[in-house]
Amino acid sequence: MSGENHILAKKILEQLGGAQNIAAYTHCMTRLRVTPKDGNMVNKQAIKKIDGVLGLVEEETLQIILGPGKVNKVSEEFDQLLQASGDVNLEELAAQKKSELKAKNATPFKLFLRQIASIFIPLIPALVASGLITGITKAVVQAGWLPAESQLATILTVIGGGLFAYLGILVGINAAKEFGGSPALGGLAGILIINPAVAGISLFGEELLPGRGGLIGVLFAAIFIAMVEKRVRRFVPQSLDIIITPTIALLITGVVTYLVFMPIGGFISDGITKGLLSILDLGGVVAGFVLGAAFLPLVVTGLHQGLTPVHLELINSIGDDPLLPILAMGGAGQVGAAFAIYMKTKKARLKRAIGGALPSGLLGIGEPLIFGVTLPLGRPFLTACLGAGIGGAFQAYFKIATVAVGVSGLPLTFLVHTQQILLYLAGLLIAYIAGFIFTYLFGFKDEMAGEFE
C-alpha cells in the first residue's frame, strides 16, 4: 500500500511542476493543499486524470482531493519526495503567493468566513470522536442496555462530554492563532467566558452567567486579545515584553469581555438560535428542502465549516441541533446520484472514481464525490441537490435533531435522539432514492463523461 501511495505522490508532484515549483503545502481531512510558485507549470488536467485523484479545486491553494485516510499517507510520501529532492524551500515565496491569491480571488467577507472555518477545522477530529462517544452512550443508556448510574456509563459520559465543557478554550487558542496572537492568550480568552467564577460578578444590577455568549463571545474575546496583544507589543521594550504585553492584553480583554462581548455574544447567539428555529417552524418542509438542497454548493466553496459554531450554539442553547440532520442530506442526495451514474455509465474510469469515493460518501465525507464525480459532470450535481432537498424536507417535518456535532451520513445515526434513529435513517434512505431517481431520469447521460475516457 505504501508503494501505491509513493507512486501517487510522485505522479502528483511531477504534474505540479516538480519539487522546485512547490512553495508550500499542507493537508486536511480529504485534500492535499499545495501552493505552487508558478501556476503555469502545473498540469491541472493531468492531475485530474491520475488514478487515485478524486478531484481538483482551485482556490487560495490547489486542493487535490484524495479522500479521508488516503490523504494522510500520500502527504507523508509527498513530504519525503520534497525532502529528498533538496531543491525546495517551502518558506520561500509562500507568504507572498498566499497574499497575492487572497487579494485576487477573495472578498473580505469570504476571507473572514474562511478564517472562522480555519478555527474549527482542526477541531473536527475531536468533535467527531466526542460526539460519537456521547451519542452512542446516550443511545445505549436510553435503550436500557446500560444503567445510567453505572460506573461504565459515567466513565463514557465523562470521556465524551469533556470536550464540550471546555471547547471554548480550544476555540480561543485557534482563534488567537488565526488572527496573529499568542495561542495561550486565546485560551485565556475562552476561560474568561466559561469560568464558573463569573457567576460571582454582578454588573448593572445583574449577575453574569458563565458561558453567556457561548462560542460567539469566545471568538470576539480571542480575536480582540490577539489584536490588543499585537498593538501593545509595538510600544513595549523587548526586554519587558513577556511581562507587560500579555498582562495588559488580558486585563483589557477581561474588562471588555464582561462589559461588551458576553452581552453582545449572548444577543447574537440568541438571535441565531431563535432565527433558525423560527425558519424551521414557519417554513417547515419548504425550509428543510431549501436548506438541504443548498448545502452542497456551500461545501464546494469550503465555507460549510463556518457553520460549526452555529451547530454548537444550538446544542448549547436548546440542548440539540435540528439543523445538522437537514444539512446532512446533502451528502445523501449525492450518494444516490453516484449510484445512478454507476448504473448508467459504461466508462470504466468513472466507475472506479465512484467506487473509490462512495464509501467516504456513505460515511459522511462528501468531497470526494463532489469534486471527483458530480461537480465535473455538471447536471448530476444539481440532481443530487434536489435529492438532498427531499431528504431535508423529511428531516424538517419530523423535527429530527442531534445531541452532538459530528460527520453526516450513516455515522450521524448515533448522534440523533434515540427515539428518532429510525426516522433519521428513513430520511437518509429517502434522500438516497430521490438523488438516484432524479439523476437516473434527468441528470446523466454517458456522453457527459468525456473527461473520464
Image: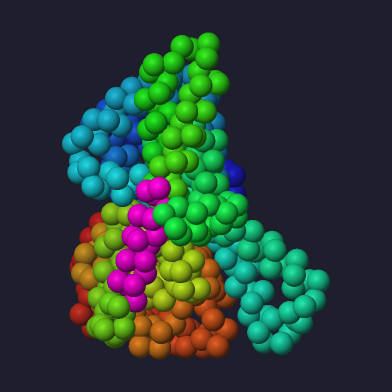
- Using the rendered view, name the quadrant where residue 134 is placed: bottom right
18 vs 4: above or below: above
Residue 23, above or below 356 = above
Is residue 244 one of those drawn in magenta?
no
- Which colour scheme appears in the figure? rainbow
Please tell me which residue is depicted at 34% across the width and 26% down the height of the picture.
95
Taking the spot 23% from the left edge, 47% from the top edge, the residue there is 109
Depth check: give the residue in front, 420 or 384.
Answer: 420
Name the spot of residue 103 as percent of width and height, x first. Answer: 21, 34
Q: Quadrant of the C terminus?
A: bottom left
Side (left or right) of 275 relative to 447:
right
Image quadrant where residue 395 sits? bottom left
Residue at the spot 69% in from the left edge and 68% down from the top edge: 157
Whether residue 451 appears in this view of the structure is yes
| Foreground of the two, 153 or 32 | 153
Relative height, residue 412 to residue 2 (above, below): below
Instruction: From the image, give the main secondary structure of the stretch colored magenta.
Output: helix
- Residue 177 sits in which quadrant? top left
Is residue 41 found left or right of 404 in the rendered image?
A: left
Name the residue at the right extreme: 151
Q: Range of the magenta residues? A: 259-277
Rendered location of residue 409, percent (x, y):
47, 72
x and y percentages locating residue 102 in the rendered image: 25, 36
